[in-house]
Amino acid sequence: MSATMVAAPRPRVPSQLLMTATTGAVAAALGFLVVVAPPATIPALVVVSIVTVVVWRTPALAAVAVVAITPLVAGIDRGRLVPGLRPNEALVLAMAGILITRAALRIPTGWRPKIRISRLEATLLLMAVANSALPIFIMLLRGRTVEADDISYALVLWKFLAVYLLVRLTVRTDREVRWCLWASMLTACVVGAIGLLQALDLLGVRHLLMTYWVPFGHDGALAQPRGGSTLALPAATADLMILNLAVAAGLWWKDRRHGRLLAGIAGMCVLGVLAAGEFSSALGLLVAVFCVTLAAGRLGTLRYVPIAVGGAALLVRPVIQHRLAGFQGPTGIPISWTVRLANLENYFWPQLFSGWNVVLGVRPAARVAVAYQGTGYVWIESGYTWLLWGGGVALFAAYLWFVRVGVLTMWAACRPLTTYRSVAALAVFAGIVSTAVLMVFDPHITYRGSADLLFALMAIVVGVGTVHTEDGPTLHHPPTGDRR
């Protein structure tokens, strides 16, 4: 998405008046809070003020903050710290508020927006509409009650598009792309290390995660030796590690610098995937590695994969042994697999394949309330079933179109691997393909943390390289020569 303008001189007096009024209002609000709020809120206000100034001066840091902080807080339940929101959602809203205010103060007289949407962005918008407005409209036509859960799930893809738009409008130069890539990798190392220690039950990490990162307050979710880390979802953590592994590999092949550091990051990402204890994630890792080496023209590197994965497997052997023990049961199949199939057969498939539901969809809500579950719900554990359930053939077709356009776009953008933008494209290419494979098992395109990063990287690829004028209505700072 981009915007152009009809040139006009920037008015100084109205802008100064608006700035004065805004500053006065903010000062009055802060003064009121200092008087009536508890003393503990004063440091928070100081932090908020500093962040506002920093983002105001360098808008790309808003994208860096979202990329770096989201994986650390996305696993905290909605409403736990921020009323009605997960902390990462509140962060995006806060950054957007700062940037919108900044843009409003800088917009020139006579500016008229002209929206241009790329093919990839068209697929994202179509997916969001097919999973929100369209199914809700069909539910109303069919006389079905739209519940709060339907509204919540209808907003899922729109939330990722909000991340996309924030990154799309702020990250403009290759240097700023580099900031985002390194912020993502360093955060991934923290998330991966926490997941590894959680899976191995070391250093009291499991107990630490029980403070805030407990899905729906269900402590049993942390009892298994699986590394959900700060995303509180092992598969999402593995997806995040896979994307950052692709980034690390791309950076090494691009620059041939920081070899040891990037090797350590890549190793932590592999450990994070295996510590998640997901068979599907191990498959996703192999698919992504093949995609990365294929796109980068480094297929010969695949001969080192068994060594790297084998060494990482030795470090997480207790996790792997626990997962393999499931094959020693009476049926010879892990109970998690049989439960997954039973849930689909009992709660979702009968209704989905009844009448016209498979064509029109059932409803956006992708879970069913079940009292005997520790979390209180049974979710759809099949990504392609989720597509048909949430939006019918329209959402299913929109997703396939997104995969096709996304793969072609990223394949072209990552070759040759000469810019940081091309490194982001390499990661997105691997992410889209591996996600398309893993959608057989779960709706990975909606997984918190990993989907945020995927959309942010897509925004980087689409946005960087666009020509912008100093008088444009961008949320970014005017040029001075220099996704999601």
Image: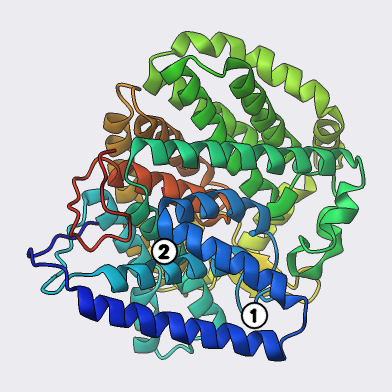
Q: Is residue 273 left or right of residue 421?
A: right
Image quadrant in which you'd find residue 29: bottom right
Q: Where is the N terminus found, in terms of image quarters?
A: bottom left
Say the numbered circle drawn on residue 83: 1
Q: Residues within 10 Å of mark 2 (few under 14, many from 20)?
A: some
Q: Is residue 344 left or right of residue 325?
A: left
Give amino acid for label 1: Pro
What residue appears at the point 52 percent right and 83 percent down from the top-left corner? 27
Q: Regarding mark 2 in the picture, which secondary structure is present there?
A: helix
Asked if labels 2 and 1 touch by Cβ distance under 8 angstroms, the answer is: no
Whether residue 199 is visible = yes
Image height of 451 relative to 294, above or below: below
Q: Nearer the viewer, residue 359 or 371?
A: 371
Image height of 34 relative to 325, above or below: below
Measure how far apart labels 1 and 2 are at the Cα level. Answer: 19 Å
What residue appears at the point 23 percent right and 70 percent down from the top-left corner? 107
Q: Which residue is mark 2?
A: 162
Say the numbered circle drawn on residue 185: none
Q: Regarding mark 1 in the picture, which secondary structure is present there?
A: loop
Q: Position of residue 380 (x, y in %)?
A: 59, 61
Whether residue 360 is visible = no
Q: Nearer the viewer, residue 182 or 295?
A: 182
What residue appears at the point 56 percent right and 68 percent down from the top-left corner? 49
